[in-house]
Image (cartoon, rainbow, N blue to C red):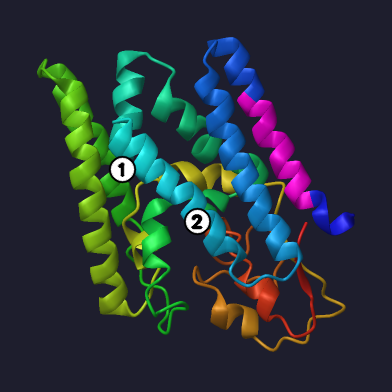
Amino acid sequence: MKKYAGPLLMLAVFETVAVTLWLTKDNLFYLFNFSYIGISIALGLFLFANQVKCARRVVQFLVGTYMLVYLGLISNENMQIEGFWYYLFTGVFEAATIHYAVAKIFGPLLFGRGWCGYACWTAMILDLLPWKAPHEPRKPYGWLRYVTFVLAFAFVAALFVLHVGHLERIMFWCFLLGNAAYYVAGIALAYLWKDNRAFCKYLCPVAVFLKPASYFSLLRIRCDKSKCVDCGKCKKVCPMDVDMTDNARTRQNGTECILCMECVQNCPKKALDLK
């Protein structure tokens, strides 16, 4: 049963959130929403525990398409960062604010940047591109995501300061155009630098929320030094350039780990594991 501890723990966490929000907000939607996400993630971890190679892809499409199509396109909820600022300015603890609190601000204290690896609908598409692992050293452009973060905040703040009308409709169009821009930029950067995750490393504003809590994450991939032979395979396959042979929280690009498990699956000595 030890190998199923991860799936059971993740399911328990999301079910706790689902029931708590259902009862406190008196809205059955939260029970369905977080139960669905929790079951999807638990299923992926279960498949991974049974060595199914496409486990993470299953979760990406189960959660990513649900949030993009159902929550975004059908329910008209802007789950992008602009939607978070919008609800925050209106003082409403709903939709995007709850999503960000659970998945991107406080949740990473438990599961790090698991959102990026298992639920992001932008990465869901980018991970289908052929450049799975970077072929060049990481570029010094990470500061650009702070620019996009500030621009998103400034844009929504300006809408409120200028008392622009029809904000809900504007937020919906921001969701559509924002996603289109993310996909175009992500694919262009992937092609330019032969790196599927270039957008995540240099432009994604959500990483600004994810990185601080991820430093203290309880769930981390750790290396058993007694088994490691320093073959370097984990570094070659890591899409985020993380040094998984170093167990320190200060390890190279430590807050970039998306728990994709590529290093775990490719380690010839089984020295890496999620603990």
- Which amino acid type corresponds to the residue marked 2 in the rendered image? Gln
The quadrant in which residue 262 appears is: bottom right
Residue 149's tag is 1
Query: Which residue is found at the position 26% from the left and 55% from the top?
Result: 182
What is the secondary structure assignment of the residue under circle 2? helix
Report whether 209 appears left or right of 87.
Answer: right
Q: Position of residue 177 (x, y in %)?
A: 18, 46
Q: Position of residue 158 (x, y in %)?
A: 15, 26
Compared to residue 186, the image places residue 33 above or below, namely above
For the record, the magenta segment spans 6-18
The quadrant in which residue 202 appears is: bottom left
Query: Which residue is found at the position 27% from the left and 68% from the top?
Result: 187
Q: Which is nearer the eye, 131 or 219? A: 131
Report whether 105 appears left or right of 97.
Answer: right
Q: Quadrant of the N terminus?
A: bottom right
What is the secondary structure assignment of the residue under circle 1? helix
Q: Which is nearer the eye, 183 or 229? A: 183
Query: Which residue is found at the position 48% from the left and 26% from the top?
Result: 98
Q: Is residue 66 visible?
A: yes
Question: Gap between marks 2 and 1, in whole Å?
Answer: 24 Å
Residue 60's tag is 2
The reply to whether discs 2 and 1 touch (Cβ–Cβ < 8 Å) is no
Of badges 2 and 1, nearer the viewer stands 2
Query: Which residue is found at the position 47% from the left and 55% from the top?
Result: 61
- Which amino acid type corresponds to the residue marked 1 in the rendered image? Phe
Q: Position of residue 75 (x, y in %)?
A: 33, 30
